[in-house]
Amino acid sequence: MASSSGGRMTTALAVAATLVIAGVGGYFLGSRTAQPGTGAEVVATVNGEKITQAELYEQLVDGYGSQVLENMILARLVNQEAAKAGVQVTDAEFEAELAKVKASFGGDLAYEQTIRQYFGMSDAQFRDYLRMQMTATRVLEKQLAPDDATLKQHFDQQQASEETRQIMARHILVATEEEAREIKAQLDGGADFATLARAKSTDPGSAENGGDLGMFGKGAMVEAFEQAAFALGDGQISEPVQSSYGWHIIQVTIPDFERDKEKIREQYVNEKVNERFTPWLTELRQNAHVTNKLG
């Protein structure tokens, strides 16, 4: 699908991708550098010739100082806005979001490889980056705070067009058609979809949530999955569907505003945050009074 076999990115990860594409992610490259200490410590020798910590630090400042300082400025601005808005990200919330990111990539090893290749970051750098994103997202979410009338208007406009309408779906992903058909037979016999998804699905991004993929529109999923999902009616379960990820069994729910208001609210806020994130950071930086002796 979009970011893993389970579907879309988490909000924070989607924002990360947007920022890297927009060039804002460069602020966070090289964010963890050596500290000067006393400067006299020897950090390496070359045929007996010493390289001191002070020499290393000077090279790091010359090579990466401006970039690292921009990172610190941006993070400080975001934290100031969060303090004004009265929002924060707790350590528990951060670790939970990081776990989701790792699961969406397929585990710790895939996570390490992806952040290095795609984001150009170490684990420590990405953690700093993710926390900044989560904090900024909280600020923007509080600014949005849509009322029911706004949500209803958005929902009605969205569902009015075949090209923009959203559905909700869950799926069970397995490796073979035989497995998929066995699961479909169990579902036809009355087995609970969410229970089977937790037990059988190989999608790390959705299995623990009963296969739930949330709300999505066209273009969010791989073509084979999308075609099958959008052809289903409310509550219907598909026959096995093959994609590049394996074999899917899909169940679709057509959103109802009153019943699904909170999911609609979440989808609306996520969409608006993703649209607003990069321009907001740019405005924040441009409107701030900053002195930068390295820049």
Image (cartoon, rainbow, N blue to C red):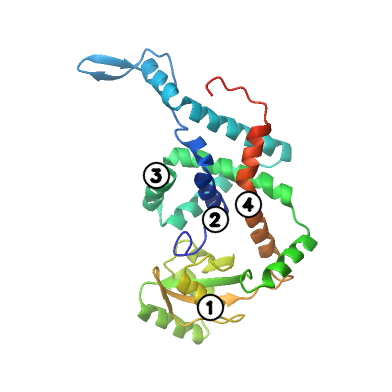
What separation in Å lies between label 4 and label 2 (alpha carbons)?
15 Å
Q: CA distance from mark 4 to mark 1?
A: 37 Å
- Asked if labels 4 and 3 touch by Cβ distance under 8 angstroms, the answer is no
Q: Secondary structure at mark 3?
A: helix
Instruction: Name the outermost residue toward the right.
Output: 149
Disc 2 on helix, strand or loop?
loop
Residue 19 percent across, percent down from the top left = 54, 45
Residue count near mark 4 (Cα–Cα under 10 Å), binned few <14, some 14–19, many ≥20: few
Residue indicated by mark 4: 275
| Mark 3 crowdedness (10 Å alpha carbons): few <14, some 14-19, many ≥20 | some
Horizontally, is 34 left or right of 78 in the view?
Answer: left
User: What residue would you read off at disc 2?
Assistant: 10
- Residue type at mark 1: give it: Asp
Residue that badge 3 annotates = 116
Query: Would residue 190 be visible to someone looking at this image?
Result: yes
In the picture, the disc for residue 181 is none
Q: Looking at the rendering, which quadrant does residue 253 occupy?
A: bottom right
Q: Three-letter amino acid code at disc 4?
A: Glu
Judge left or right: residue 196 versus residue 154. left
Amino acid type, callout 2: Thr
Front: mark 4 or 2: 4
In the image, what residue type sits under mark 3? Arg
Is there any visible trace of residue 89 in the rendered image? no
For the point 44% across and 70% down, the residue is 201
Mark 1 residue element: loop
| Residue 87 placement, left or right of 26 | right
Q: Which residue is mark 1?
A: 192
93 lies above or below 271: above
17 to the left or right of 162:
left
* Closer to us: 44 or 233: 233
